[in-house]
Amino acid sequence: MPGPRELTLRPEHAGSIPAVTVLAGPTAVGKGTVSQYIREHYPQVSLSVSATTREPRPGEVDGIHYSFLSHPQFDHLIEQGKMLEWAEVHGLNKYGTRRDTVEAAIRDGQHVLLEIDLQGARQVRQSMPEATFVFLAPPSWDELVRRLVGRGTESTHEQHRRLETARLELAAEPEFDAVIVNDTVGQAASRLVEVMQLPAQQ
C-alpha cells in the first residue's frame, strides 16, 4: 500500500507504458540501492550507464559501471545535442546520460531507468518530456539523517553540506509525476515497477 505522502501517477501518464522512467531524490535516500535491486530482479529493465570524463577506478569496467570518455569526446556529444543531461562536478569531471544509448535500449524494447540527481532530472524534463519522473523520498527527515550519518563515508562537514542540499531537494517533490517512499528497498522497488507498468515479480 502506498505511504501517506505518496502520490498516484498523474492522469496524463495513466494507461501508457513509459519507455523511460527517471528516478531522482535527495542524497542518501537510497536511489542506487533501489536501482541495483531493480537490475538484479527485473532483467527487462535497462539501467542507463552514465558517461563520465573521470578515469576508471580499479575494478570498474567501461560500459558496465560507466561509459568512460575523454573531455573532447564528452564536449563533442554536448555540442551535437547527444546528451540527455550532464553536469560538471567540482569543476573537474563531467557526468551525464547519452541520448543514443537510451534510444537504442528503447528500440530493443527495453524499459529504461535513469537514476540521476535532481539537476539531471530537470534537464531530462526539457530534453525528453514524455518520460515518467519518480521522486524517491525518505520515510522521514530523521531517517534520512540516520542513513547519511550511518554510512560513514563523509566527514562531519560534508554531512552537514549534503543535508542542507537534501532540504532543498526534498522541496522538489511536487515537480514529479509520482512519489515513492523508500521505507524498505524491496517495497520501494515494487512500487517503482508498478509505475513502470512492468509485470509483477514471480
Image (cartoon, rainbow, N blue to C red):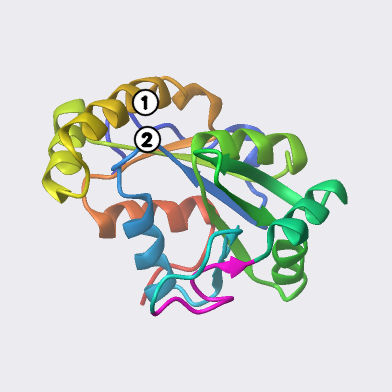
Residue 99 in view: no
Disc 2 secondary structure class: loop
Which segment is the magenta one?
Answer: 59-68
Q: Position of residue 192 (x, y in %)?
A: 43, 53
Figure quadrant of residue 44: bottom right
Single out the mark in the foreground, 1 or 2: 1
Tell which circle, 1 or 2, labels the residue nearer the N-terminal end.
Answer: 2
Q: Is residue 83 left or right of residue 117?
A: right
Residue 19 in view: yes
For label 1, count other residues whose C-alpha is less than 10 Å away and answer few (under 14), some (14-19) or many (20+).
Answer: few
Q: What kind of residue is marked 2?
A: Pro
Which quadrant is home to the C terminus?
bottom left
Q: Position of residue 114 (x, y in %)?
A: 56, 54
Q: In percent of the image, x 28 and y 45: which residue is there?
A: 182
Q: In percent of the image, x 73 and y 43: which residue is there?
A: 130
Q: Position of residue 36 (x, y in %)?
A: 37, 66
Residue for badge 1: 165
Residue 82 vertical position relative to residue 125 in the rendered view, above or below = below
Q: In percent of the image, x 61 and y 64: which residue is there?
A: 111
Q: In percent of the image, x 65 and y 54: which residue is there?
A: 97
Q: Residue furthest right?
A: 80
Q: What kind of residue is marked 1?
A: Thr
Front in this rendered view, residue 149 or 179: 149
Magenta stretch: includes residue 60: yes
Look at the numbered discs 1 and 2 and tell me whether their residues touch, using CB distance below 8 Å: yes
Residue 90 vertical position relative to residue 197 in the rendered view, above or below = above
Q: Position of residue 42 (x, y in %)?
A: 45, 73
Q: Which mark is residue 26?
A: 2
Magenta stretch: includes residue 101: no
Residue 95 vertical position relative to residue 3 in the rendered view, above or below = below
In space, the residues marked 1 and 2 are separated at their CA atoms by 8 Å
